């Protein structure tokens, strides 16, 4: 039975702001490379000055060729990701073809706009979307990145972007390292380095936890589809970065 009243944008909300009642996800970075895109997220969620979770996963596959990461109110963001995944799968089954990458970004923008009422009361969740463009004419531009604002505005980014409380520091790190034509291996390392730099200055961003063996979630989207790097590989890169920072703390 259809129940449109249960969709996020149609739920009645009590008056006032409620930002303090739910955990918040933080920093996500993404950058393009010669094979497609890389997206990485730290694992920390916070409630005020408390760590609500040390191993939350904020980066997910949207469909076989695209990735989505969320920052802001964690519960709203995770629900947004699941609904987006279902919508893309539903469209493909009905139409017999995938939406274009621009079409996927525009659909996600409409879903964000549907959450505007909750966002105005402090329950803000903003995603970042990136993917491999199967329709790209230029092989050098197969990896595309889209950012959004709280009102559903969608903007295509060039090269790299970051969202969340540590995004200012992460983007500053990527600004110094990014160049067109990065290999996937280089992009993965730069993404983890950017998260390390964000965690160095932002208390809401979690750095690599070598004691508990909790490392950033890193995913790629290329012509072969999406892929999540195993924690052993991500952990090795993170430990190399930590070792290098012993010699040069500023990176």
Image (tube, rainbow, N blue to C red):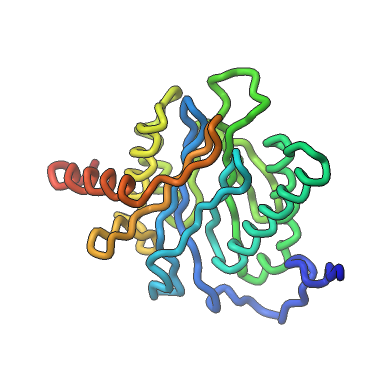
- Residue 215: give x, y in percent of width and height: 34, 55
Q: Is residue 55 left or right of residue 156?
A: left
| Residue in the image at 45% along x and 54% along y | 27
- Position of 63 relative to 215 (above/below): above
Q: Residue furthest top?
A: 138
Q: Residue furthest left?
A: 247
| Residue in the image at 47% along x and 25% along y | 34
Q: Quadrant of the C terminus?
A: top left
| Residue in the image at 72% along x and 62% along y | 116
Observer-nearest of 121 and 228 = 228
Observer-nearest of 5 and 110 = 5
Hey, which quadrant is residue 165 in on the image? Answer: bottom left
Q: Is residue 136 left or right of residue 32?
A: right
- Residue 38: give x, y in percent of width and height: 47, 39
- Position of 27 relative to 117 (above/below): above
Q: Residue furthest right?
A: 1
Q: Quadrant of the N terminus?
A: bottom right
- Position of 171 relative to 114 (above/below): above
């Amino acid at each position: 039975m259809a129940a449109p009243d249960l969709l996020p944008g149609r739920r009645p909300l009590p008056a006032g702001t409620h930002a303090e009642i739910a955990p918040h996800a933080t920093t996500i970075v993404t950058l393009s490379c010669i094979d497609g895109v890389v997206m990485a997220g730290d694992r920390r969620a916070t409630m005020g000055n408390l760590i609500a979770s040390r191993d939350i996963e904020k980066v997910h596959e949207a469909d076989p060729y695209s990735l989505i990461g969320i920052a802001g109110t964690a519960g709203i963001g995770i629900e947004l990701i699941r609904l987006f995944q279902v919508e893309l799968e539903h469209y493909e089954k009905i139409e017999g073809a995938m939406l274009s990458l621009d079409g996927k970004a525009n659909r996600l923008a409409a879903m964000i706009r549907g959450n505007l009422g909750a966002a105005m009361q402090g329950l803000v969740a903003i995603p970042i979307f990136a993917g491999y463009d199967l329709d790209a004419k230029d092989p050098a531009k197969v990896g595309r990145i889209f950012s959004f604002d709280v009102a559903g505005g969608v903007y295509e980014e060039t090269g790299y972007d970051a969202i969340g409380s540590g995004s200012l520091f992460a983007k500053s790190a990527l600004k110094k390292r990014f160049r067109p034509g990065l290999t996937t291996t280089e992009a993965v390392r730069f993404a983890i380095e950017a998260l390390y730099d964000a965690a160095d200055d932002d208390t809401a961003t979690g750095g690599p936890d070598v004691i508990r063996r909790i490392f950033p979630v890193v995913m790629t989207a290329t012509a072969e589809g999406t892929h999540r790097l195993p924690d052993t590989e991500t952990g090795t890169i993170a430990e190399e970065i930590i070792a290098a920072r012993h010699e040069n703390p500023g990176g």
